[in-house]
Structure formats: C-alpha cells, structure tokens
Amino acid sequence: MRAEAAEILALVDGARRIVVISHKDADGDTLGSALAMAEMLRSRGKAVAMRVPPPVPGIYAFLPGYETINLEESGEPPDLVVVMDASNLERLSDTLGPLPEGTPVVNIDHHVSNSRFGTLNLVMPDASSTAEVTFDLLHEMAVEITSTMATNLYSGVLTDTGGFRHENTTFRVLEIAADLVKRGANAADIAGRIYKSQKLTSMRLQALTMSTIGFDCDDRLVYASVTQEMLRKSGARMDESEGLIDVLNSVEGLELALLFKEIDPFLTKISVRSRGAANANVLASAFGGGGHERASGAEIPMPIRQAMEVVLAEARRMLEITAST
C-alpha cells in the first residue's frame, strides 16, 4: 500500500476542492470510511463535499460528520474525486455527475468484484471492509486518527463483519478494532446504536418480511421478500430493510440466503449471503451484480415475482452442483 498511499497523498496535496462519494443503499462501511476520509482531507485544508445517493439511512445519524452529507455545494467542479466502498460506477447512481476532463478519481474499496474504474485504484479484497483499508491508508500517510475518525472507522469494521460474526473477522480485524477503541471509539455505544435501536416501523417490516419466508433444496436455500405494499403497511422506508438478510442468514444449516426487494414495479434488488461451498458473489454476478464470496447483491430490471423465479432457479442449480461435488 505504500506506493498507493504516496500517490493518493500527492493527488490530495495538489487538489483544492475534493468530493468524497459513498455508494447507493449506504451502509456503515461506506459511510464510516467516507466520513473518516473527509475529516482527514479537511484537516489538510481542503474544501470537501460529501455525496451519498439518498435516502441516507437515519440509523447512522450518530456518526460524526453525518450532518455534512449532501450539503449544498458551490457549483465549482472538483479537482479530485474519492470514491469509497463502491465496486463499480453504477453503485454511485447519478451522484458522480459529469466531471471536467482529466479530473482524477481515487477508488478505495475491498470488493473482489471491483471493476478498477479509478484513475488510481486502492482495492484490497482480503480486507474485511473499506474501513480497514482506510485505517491502513491513514497509517501509511502518517495521519493521526482522531476519536471521531475512530468512531467512523469502527462502525465500518463492525457492520461489515456482521458485528464480528462473519468469516472476515480475523485476528488483525480485532487488533484494528481494539486500536480504534483505544483512540476513542465507544464500542458499546456504537453497537447499541446500530443493533439495538430499531424503530417500530422496522420491527413491523421485519414481521411482514418473515411472513414471506420460503425454504428449498432441503432447507439449504432460504428466501424472503420486501414489497412496496409491505412498506406502506409498516410505515417503513426501504433502507430499514438493511438488516433483514442477516436474520435469514441466521437459519441453521442454510447455504444460500436471498432477500428480494421491490424497488419499483420493474426493478428488484437482491441481497445474497452464503455459507459452505456456495458463493454469493458468483450468484450475484450472474445477474450483473457482485460483492464478496459470502455477501453480495444485484439489481435486476424485472418485476419482483419474475426476478424471484429466475434467481431462485439459478440458486437451486448452484446448490445442486455443490451437493454433487
């Protein structure tokens, strides 16, 4: 990372106005990493704007700097764009917008499916999270991590490891988490705000979603759906469905968990989790998405019922193959 850190620092020092961008359907990793990066850039005297495709999940409103997200900008084009935790440009929705020719784009990520779309790409697929990549990058830059940076980075590590429950929870991840706590991240408070602060509307949505649960392939395949009608009934927003895939992923003995979300009548989003020989990234990639071996997603331009038919057929085919090997 040393060479990339030096190159990024050179781009930063040569820029005056910098835009930091998170991916759509923002989670704790993309927001925490981006907010920590934005704070570092401001500490170097840069004018920084932070863009996140709306809606921005309110559960992360406690993150330091959250109030700076999507503030009105001057209209002056940026000298540098830094994209955090996005595997491709499509994940940015239309947030990036047209850039002046030659504007450098720094792509900082940890997804194995990253398309290397940046002028400079710092992509570390073995990292647990983009927050971990950002932590290492700041160390290489000899940046002192403040308590607010620590809170943001800890939140990113916590959420992308599933509260330190996923396979990407390595010895080094726990060392980084401990370091961030030492620097001021309040582990109990952060966990409480993320995992113990569900709104009543979220609980209603979870109940409706669990009523759609289905099992297949000798219960190795578990799936459920979230529709616009369920959002209306519960009073919830779609971003409140973020943790529902992890509820499905808690079923004993499963190999694939799928959550289907009806974004609009002709667009369905799928979230995929896997265990054992099943690969979430392979399934999501078959439908134009991607991510990690254990956690991936895709957007499919189909009505939800049609999307469920084609994705479940492919999931069954995958599990038949894994069962025979």
Image (cartoon, rainbow, N blue to C red):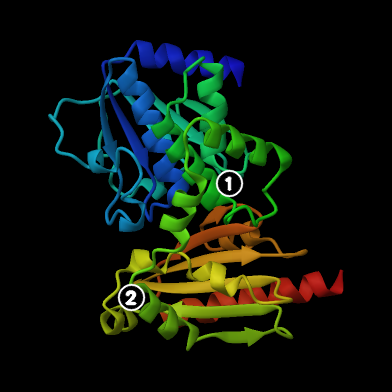
Q: Report the front residue among 150 and 41.
A: 150
- Measuring from the top left, give residue 283's x and y in whole percent: 62, 64
Q: How many discs appear? A: 2
Q: Image point 30% across, 45% down: which residue? A: 52
Q: Is residue 194 above or below residue 132?
A: below
Contact check, label 2 and label 1, Cβ < 8 Å? no
Is 253 left or right of 9, judged from the image as shown? right
Q: What number is the disc on residue 286?
A: none
Q: Is residue 194 visible?
A: yes
Tell me the element at label 1: loop
Q: Secondary structure at mark 2?
A: helix
Image quadrant containing the C terminus: bottom right
Residue hosting label 2: 200
User: Could you say which quadrant of the image residue 170 lies in?
Assistant: top right
Q: Position of residue 119 (x, y in %)?
A: 45, 25
For the point 36% across and 73% down, the residue is 202
* Marks 2 and 1, how far apart at CA: 36 Å
Determine which residue is flagged by label 1: 113
In the depicted view, which residue is nearer to us: 263 or 33?
A: 33
Q: Residues within 10 Å of mark 2 (few under 14, many from 20)?
A: few
Residue type pointed to by label 1: Ser
In the image, 186: left or right of 99?
right
Residue furthest bottom in the image: 211
Residue 47 placement, left or right of 138: left
Q: Amino acid at mark 2?
A: Leu
Relative to 309, say whether 243 is above or below: above
User: Looking at the image, is mark 2 or mark 1 earlier in the sequence?
Assistant: 1
Q: Picture coordinates of residue 234 (x, y %)?
A: 30, 81
- Relative to 14, residue 227 above or below: below
Q: Position of residue 228 (x, y in %)?
A: 31, 78
